[in-house]
């Protein structure tokens, strides 16, 4: 499988981000301590989570190094790891 291209992906950024925005808006008044963003891509979904739950520890994971490079450059204060879902979930440790 070829690696994802973050620039190509974000050509449709609004369309790709809207489902994340809709989900975050439906979460109600929860206050999570930790959030795991599976398939975080170039940070569009993780950004929505960080805006809403800024006090939470947020970890974004993706299998594409290109997506992760874009995510790290955009949000250097957040943690991002290269991981394959579901193969590597046990390695993350803890509860999210």
Image (cartoon, helix red, strand yellow):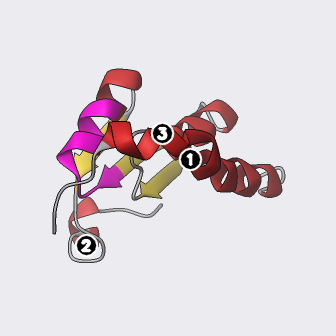
Q: Which residue is mark 3?
A: 11
Judged left or right of residue 65, residue 29 is: right
Residue 16 horizontal/vertical position (percent): 57, 51
Q: Nearer the viewer, mark 3 or mark 1?
A: 3
> Which residue occupies 81% across, 57% down?
26
Residue 45 horizontal/vertical position (percent): 54, 46
> Which residue occupies 24% across, 33% down?
69
> Which residue occupies 83% across, 54% down?
28
Mark 2, secondary structure of its residue: helix
Name the magenta segment's main secondary structure.
helix
> Residue 55 colored magenta?
no
Q: Mark 1 packing: few (<14 Cα in 10 Å), some, or many (20+)? A: few
Q: Is residue 19 visible?
A: yes
Q: Nearer the viewer, residue 7 or 37?
A: 7
Q: Which mark is residue 33?
A: 1
Cα distance in 3D space between marks 1 and 2: 19 Å
Q: Mark 3 packing: few (<14 Cα in 10 Å), some, or many (20+)? A: few
Q: Which mark is residue 90?
A: 2
Q: Quadrant of residue 6?
A: top left
Judged left or right of residue 39, residue 68 is: left
Tell me whether circle 2 and circle 3 mark residues in contact (CB < 8 Å). Answer: no
């Amino acid at each position: 499988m070829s690696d994802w291209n973050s620039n190509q992906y974000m050509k449709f950024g609004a369309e790709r981000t809207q489902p994340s925005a809709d989900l975050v808006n439906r979460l109600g008044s929860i206050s999570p301590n930790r959030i795991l963003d599976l398939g975080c891509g170039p940070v569009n979904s993780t950004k929505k989570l960080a805006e809403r739950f800024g006090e939470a520890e947020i970890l974004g994971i993706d299998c594409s190094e290109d997506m992760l490079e874009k995510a790290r450059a955009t949000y250097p204060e957040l943690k991002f790891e290269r991981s394959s879902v579901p193969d590597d979930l046990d390695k993350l440790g803890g509860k999210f």
